Image: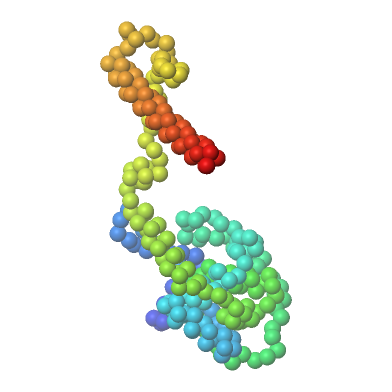
Amino acid sequence: MPRKLTKDQRYNRKRRKDGNKDFRRVPKEGNFDGVRVTRKQITFYISNEASERLQQMADNVGVFKWEMASRMILKGLPGIQSSGYASLRNPEAINRYEWNVLYLEPVIKRIHYRSSKADKRVTIDVTSTAWNKIHCHSTATERSMSQIFQSLCLNYKPLTKEQRETSKLAREEYLRNQEVPKEEKTTRYYKPYEQPSKFMDVGWDLIHVKGIPVEHWDGAEFDEYCELMDKKFAKLKRDMDERIKLNDELFGKLQSSADELEE
């Protein structure tokens, strides 16, 4: 008879199973469910200086330590796809990436460990994507994950306050756009279709594109003709007024130059 698992064992098994996916769907009000990142436990052996800087960066940004660690791994290391660690399956899928087993689960893994001892042991739950990425990067660079993480803690440069504010405003704008109805989005980014004109400009007059004589026009065509002619003459008048104004200015300058020469 199989041994019955304890409450903690069932919880840990559920967490490990949950961590095999990059994301997890969660119920949400509206037409679509939301998603959240899954997390996996990892342990690093780092110096006191690296540990203190990790905590300081997390406090400055106002996030938990695991969030700062995940952010450093995802942003500070080379890209997942560009490095060949994984390929993108579908941006909307739960298992978003198809990880390269040659990096994630190598048969032979050569790691150069440092000779000095670590000062502190840090165990945190990073996101599953960050967990997979740092494992792949460790295999590719032949460095231990603790070395990689310590280097990130000491050298990572987080966003400034102004950059965080700009990013926050951009995200809020994106979320507002997501709440806008589809019809309103369409009218915002795309101009409504305009019926092409039935008349063609040939200089001082307009003629019907189909060559229909005036006596056979209907009321809509006649109204369109009158409207277009009004716009045409109004534009001609504006152009004429501007030309007269420029000529007057030029004449005034020439007159003043002639007066100065006479003096």
Return the residue found at the far left.
Answer: 219
Q: Quadrant of residue 30?
A: bottom left
Residue 112 at x, y = what percent? Answer: 71, 81
Image height check: is 237 above or below 260?
above
Residue at the (42%, 30%) spot, across then down: 244
Given residues 207 and 171, the one toward you in this image is: 207
Q: Is residue 228 visible?
A: no
User: Which quadrant of the figure contains the N terminus?
Assistant: bottom left
Q: Quadrant of residue 203?
A: top left
Given residues 93 and 120, the one toward you in this image is: 120
Image height check: is 107 above or below 206?
below
Residue at the (65%, 79%) spot, across then down: 144
Residue 39 at x, y = what percent? Answer: 47, 72
Image height check: is 194 above or below 223?
below
Residue at the (67%, 66%) spot, across then down: 102
Q: Is residue 144 visible?
A: yes
Given residues 71 and 251, the one toward you in this image is: 251
Question: What scheme was used to colour the molecule?
Answer: rainbow
Q: How many marks?
A: 0
Residue 117 at x, y = what percent? Answer: 65, 91
Image height check: is 181 above or below 38?
above
43 sits left or right of 5 in the view: right
Residue at the (45%, 65%) spot, across then down: 167
Residue 99 at x, y = what percent? Answer: 59, 63
Return the residue found at the far front.
Answer: 263
